[in-house]
Image (tube, rainbow, N blue to C red):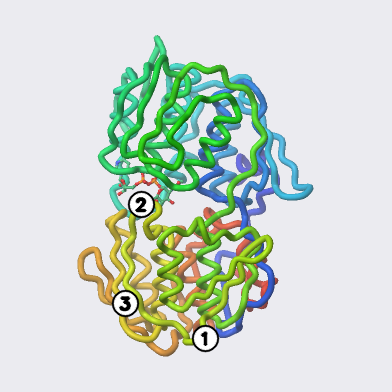
Amino acid sequence: MNSSLLAAAPWWRPDTGDTLVIQGGRPLVGTYPISGAKNAVLPLMVSALLTPHLVTLHNVPANLDVAVLAALLQRLGCEMHWSTKADLSVTISADRVQPGRIDPDLVSRMRASVLLLGALLARCGEALLPMPGGDAIGLRGIDFHIDGLRAMGAAVELEGGMIRARAPRGLRGADILLPLPSVGATENLLLAALHAQGTTTIRNAAREPEIADLAACLIAMGARISGLGSHVLTVEGGAPLAGAIHTVLPDRIEFGTLALAAAVTGGALSLRHGRIDLLGVAASSFAAAGVDLQQADGGVVARRARNGLAGVDVTTGPYPGFATDLQAPVMALLATAAGASAVTETIFEQRFRHVDELAKMGAAIAVRGRTALIRGVDRLQGATVTCTDVRAAAALVIAGLGADGETRLGGLDHLDRGYDRMTQKLAFCGADIARLG
Ligand code: UD1
């Protein structure tokens, strides 16, 4: 596993030590560089499959998901050249693509690998993919993806844990209504539609900024896409696609997570490349909870508001609603905010697995169906906890940074999947944090 990652992503350093040890209570102070968005770079890397020309991406986050996708693309015949000169950049050449060679072990590690389906169908007319893996946070069906591809003329069969899709005579444009504004389905169908004959309309499309970032790169390649940032995306298929050079959007989830960490520890972080405008509704929830954000030159300064942390009610929703990926992190802050909070999760049905872990640290949280009721306590205490998904991992780091005493985190693959060198960046800002074991 690690050898195929290192071959495809030589910058990837599997961090030694499977326990993250944090001595809490130190304010975070300094500059924390926000990396490119994980959720933008994955579809952008997959989009390189659509063209035989070179696609160069700058501001690539150095995380495990990127390394896994790089290994998958390499198996499919892509060549990748990495540069670590200024930021991490990759140039991908998908001159020769061999659609049959997908590694089930790698696919099982990452839900976003389902995006290979649309891109491979479009480029090669066929795709054979094991059912994708990813976080254990709910059903996370892929029915919208499959129904959309079928509407575009693909024959898709599910058998023995595999998805087999074929469109030997090519895909055709279709009018598709998504039952929910699914991020992944919007991206998958967008990619597939580029090589379909005629016009594809995706209604009830997701509007996350990462989709507009993907579309911007595709348009630079020559794609004809309209309706960016709206619920209706229209694609005129069949335009020849050239290469492109694109800089990945800053990660709004990493930004929001570190803003919360600054406020929890009572420090002040200058979040380089952070953008308040990408937070959507979360910006006003953060303000109400006592997270002070000031946009400055080249980034955002985040600190605790003078009146301290206060309980707020939060309901997750599709963008610009409160991002489900910030739900666990905000709960780590609300655990010690004055008063009560209600956090309702509407996107994923099992995304409260961090609650038991936060409770081990002294948080007072009761789950009633899709809502977690939080009574703010004065302090959390360090404990031994386990990361249950990518965003739960971030929440536990925030909790550990603010807690009294020592917190020991296991299950660090989750942290590595989503965050670029978090341990080093935090240590640089004064955290007492180290990986041991
Ligand atoms: C993406 C993000 C993830 C984020 C999520 C919601 C990436 C790589 N991941 O995940 O970080 O938490 O958006 O903002 O960008 N659904 C179905 N059938 C489908 C597709 C989705 O029922 O075919 C449901 C899911 O189970 C879920 C909801 O729709 O309840 C939203 O899922 P979706 O937006 O597709 O999330 P992802 O694209 O997997």
Q: Is residue 8 visible?
A: no
The image quarter in which residue 336 lies: bottom left
Query: Looking at the image, which residue is at 44% across and 42% down?
Result: 229
Residue most extreme to the bottom? 378
Residue wearing tag 3: 341
Q: Is residue 46 above or below residue 354?
A: above
Is the residue at mark 2 in contact range of ligand 1, meaning its CB lies under 8 Å from it?
Answer: yes
Q: Earlier in the sequence, mark 1 or mark 3?
A: 1
- Badge number at residue 146: none
Q: Amino acid at mark 3?
A: Ser
Residue wearing tag 1: 306
In the rendered image, residue 351, in percent from the top left (x then y), is placed at: 33, 60
Query: Looking at the image, which residue is at 30% across and 61% down?
Result: 345
Q: Is residue 406 visible?
A: yes
Callout in the foreground (1, 3): 1
Tell me if 287 is positioned left or right of 314 in this view. Answer: right
Q: Is residue 107 above or below residue 96?
A: below
- Badge number at residue 318: 2
Q: Earlier in the sequence, mark 3 or mark 2?
A: 2
Callout 2: SS: loop
Callout 1: SS: loop
Callout in the foreground (1, 2): 1
For marks 3 and 2, give the CA distance.
21 Å
